[in-house]
Amino acid sequence: MILTNHQLAASLDEGLGLHMTWLRKIFRCVLLGIAPGADMVAEDAHERCPFSTWLTRTLPTLRALDGQRAEALRLVHRQLHDDVRNFCRKLSSAQPLQPEDIDAVEVSHDRVVNLLTNLKSQAVVLSASIDPLTGLATRALMAMDYLHLQKQCARHDARLAVVLVDVDHFKSINDIYGHAGGDQALCQMATTLRDVLRGNDRIYRYGGEEFVAFCEVHTAADADVLSRRILEAVRAIQVDIGNTPAQLTATLGCTIAEPDEPLEDVIERADRAMYRGKRAGRDRAVIAAPD
């Protein structure tokens, strides 16, 4: 089962805890003269320890997050067991330990902890960047994507259209169908926007019932065609909530970003255009020229 990023962050804490518990067992064996267990000295010890069980269960999600770090974690976990096995066998046979024996264990341990920490950081960042309800990117990613897309448009001799999409009468949907119905409507809206936009366009859940799309265009006429295509797709949505279908509409504010224009200014202009559409009766798109 692939975990969500939020679940993965918590699971990585569990993995780190299992690793540290196993390490404390090694310290106790060394300090108290206790014979090490099979999860320390067996040739397949890397498959016997509790961390191994956790890693096997979590590895598919880790690979989806960062394949290179996931593979590094798998390999260094095995290396750590090899280093600990060598360490324990020398202790058991009364052979003198060399500084490099301890160094090897410390290096492998540090690498395991660093990889787990870095993977958790990635999961936490992505958890904050992906809306758990709709699966869309959130506004946390918008600023980074905006700068990248502005540069991409410049290379393509194109412009970046920013479209603010606001679901009409969303409060009424919540009042009539409940919050579960409202959530279903938002998910259907997200699916529709993903389907209607092109592969290189970006769509975000901006907050509440608002969505933002970044789309590469060449002219204001392209932005107008894009906005109308979104409107028609939204009008076709039929959300089956219980036995009562709900039809959605949306009001759009669209503008074209100027080169090097701050994202905040572009969003504000699109927002003003969207509110003009609301005042004019909703279920329409308003195109705002740059100030």
Image (spheres, rainbow, N blue to C red):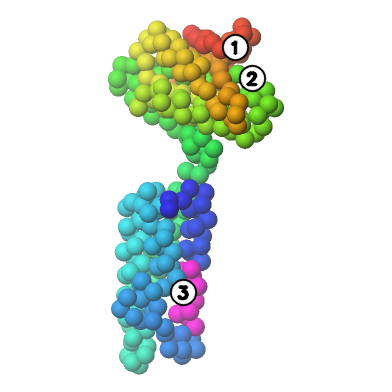
- Find out whether the residues at labels 1 and 2 contact each other: C-beta distance under 8 Å: yes
* Mark 3 and mark 2: Cα distance apart in space: 56 Å
Q: Residue at x 29, y 20 (%)?
A: 156
- Find out whether the residues at labels 3 and 1 contact each other: C-beta distance under 8 Å: no
Q: Position of residue 42 (x, y in %)?
A: 34, 80
24 drawn magenta: yes
Q: Position of residue 239 (x, y in %)?
A: 54, 26
Amino acid carrying mark 2 in the image: His
Residue receiving disc 3: 22
* Mark 1 and mark 2: Cα distance apart in space: 9 Å
Magenta residues span 18-28
* Mark 3 and mark 1: Cα distance apart in space: 62 Å
Which dot, 3 or 2, sits closer to the camera? Answer: 2
12 drawn magenta: no
SS assignment at label 1? loop
Residue receiving disc 1: 282
Horizontally, residue 75 falls left or right of residue 227, namely left
Residue receiving disc 2: 169
Decide which of tag 1 and tag 2 comes sooner along the chain: 2
Decide which of tag 3 and tag 1 comes sooner along the chain: 3
